[in-house]
Image: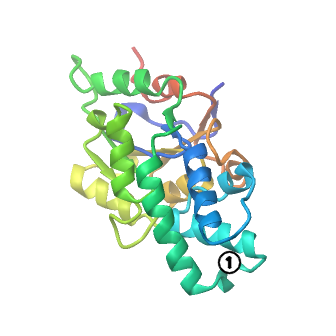
Amino acid sequence: MIRVFRPIPVERLKLLVFDLDGTLIDSAQDLCNSVNASLAEFGLKPLPDPTIAGFVGNGAPLLMRRSLAMATNAAVEQVDADLFNKAYAFFLQYYREHKLDFTYAYDGVLDSLKALHELHDAPGGSRRIMAVLTNKPVRPARGICEGLGLADYFLHIYGGDSFPMKKPDPFGLRSLMEETGASPEETVMIGDSKVDVETARNGGTWSVGCTFGFGLHTLAENPPDVLVDTASEWTQVLALPR
């Protein structure tokens, strides 16, 4: 179901920026497995998958730091620095090797990306550009997009280490707008959590929230302009009316 809180002027859109985890892909199991493998490596008990999944969205360092805090009964800011550095390095290495064990594109993602991409070449099409902006490190982000057949739809795939600041800081979003010549009014951020909505707000762009991802509970705190329940609804929300 589509819920519109503020109509998006689809006829003006030039740049569609997608989050990755919880928006294009369900990567929860591989992330949870990688975190728990890291905890086990350092003699710590595993955390429930839903707990770890709830930490996803603000980048891999904070995901690991929050997990270590939970596993050691410490405050996030009090996690031992040496333990964090070693556990985070182990996490990155393990995740690079296991990032596609269970990760898959959500239903409707490939068809919707194909339909939105074809608008570029259609007669009277909107000549839009699509990109990925995720807080996941860029190397696994690109590897996952390539492995799942998503990469060819995007001009750029940027990660949490591609810019000096991560989402919700708008640096990456504004950089994409500068690179593509799109104004905030011509740009939309599509994501599953308040991090993506806040990124859009901070960058002055439009936002589409996806309830099928990891951050549904946070979207109530920061409602997007439009809310969708499936990736298939992206075409209804973002395609030009015929």
**Which percent across, then down, holds residue 74?**
75, 80
**Which percent across, then down, holds residue 201?**
52, 57
Q: Quadrant of residue 172?
A: bottom left
Alpha-carbon neighbours of circle 1 within 10 Å: few (<14), some, or many (≥20)? some
Q: Tell whether 42 sits left or right of 99.
A: right
Position of the C terminus, as image quadrant, is top left
Q: Tell whether 220 sits left or right of 162.
A: right
**Colouring of the image:** rainbow
**Which percent across, then down, holds residue 69?**
70, 74
**Which percent across, then down, holds residue 134?**
44, 54
Q: Tell whether 178 sits left or right of 240.
A: left
**Residue type, mark 1 in image:** Val
**84 or 230, nearer to the observer:** 84
> Which residue sits at x=33%, y=47%?
142
Residue 231 seen by the camera = yes
> Which residue sits at x=46%, y=70%?
89
**135 or 130, nearer to the observer:** 135
Q: Which residue is mark 1?
A: 76
> Which residue sits at x=38%, y=28%?
113
Residue 135 seen by the camera = no
> Which residue sits at x=35%, y=34%?
150
